[in-house]
Amino acid sequence: MATILNIETATKNCSVSIAKEGKVIAIKELNDGNYSHAEMLHPFIKELTEESGVSLSEIDAFAVSKGPGSYTGLRIGVSAVKGLCFSFDKPLISIETLKSLASKISEKKGLIIPMIDARRMEAYTAVFDANHQQIRETKAEIITSESYLEYLEKGMVYFLGDGAEKCKEVITHKNAVFVDNQFPSSNEMAGLSFEKYKKNDIEDVAYFEPFYLKDFIVIPEKKKKSIF
């Protein structure tokens, strides 16, 4: 029986779960509007092992949300998972963050567009069908009133994620459905990581890096002062 620990830190939701055969047996999450990953991730892992009675040595694989998302959040999650994989000599499984988010929607028809906030009117997005199969590549894009019209004209489109909230006033098509208060979670990661585990679809622990999508740009202090 495969036991997998899943870590999601791509957005403000700090989420950890332990799952057996793809079914969550214990989960800890905190989404208080702040990035609390550095403070809460390791305590969550410790609490889960104590509550579930599953020690880290009994975990068969460690899974992490690979992005896109918060640069710092992804680094924290991947660093933690790499440390666990090296310590216990276990495989690392990566899960596409937008696919995990799309898995929250269970509709028989229509398309699903998960959206992760990338500041201003930009979002990380992808397009999935009702079976959660990706039909358009993941990319960072500026959202306008013309966005996704080719999909909206054909049927219902479900938008979710922290990037979707700011799009409500821009995307006003009658076929647009906004699903509120949804974030990537280790809960949906459980089934996805188990499927990858069965296929031995794992990463090279030493060389694996998150999918940042956009370069992280640090503005020097002098420039910051000059632009305000």
Image: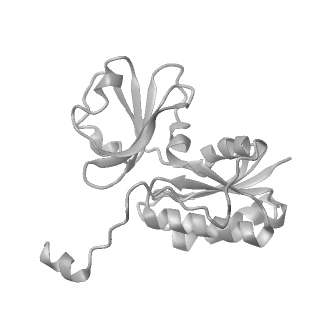
Pick the front one: 97 or 184: 97
Pick the front one: 14 or 86: 86
Is 113 above or below relative to 28?
above
Pick the front one: 132 or 137: 137
Image position of 19 (left or right of 179): right
Q: Which quarter of the rendered picture does the C terminus lie within?
A: bottom left
Pick the front one: 169 or 138: 138
- At horizontal 49% and vertical 68% (from top left) the residue drawn is 36
Is 99 above or below relative to 38?
above
Image position of 113 (left or right of 186): left
Q: How is the image coloured?
A: one colour
Image position of 212 (left or right of 8): left
Residue 45 location in percent, x, y? 68, 66
- At horizontal 56% and vertical 50% (from top left) the residue drawn is 185
Is 219 above or below relative to 14?
below
Q: Is residue 46 among what the camera can see?
A: no
- At horizontal 44% and vertical 64% (from top left) the residue drawn is 71
Q: Is residue 201 among what the camera can see?
A: yes
Residue 34 location in percent, x, y? 42, 64
- At horizontal 60% and vertical 49% (from top left) the residue drawn is 95
* Number of numbered discs: 0
Q: Quadrant of residue 18?
A: bottom right
Residue 204 location in percent, x, y? 68, 60
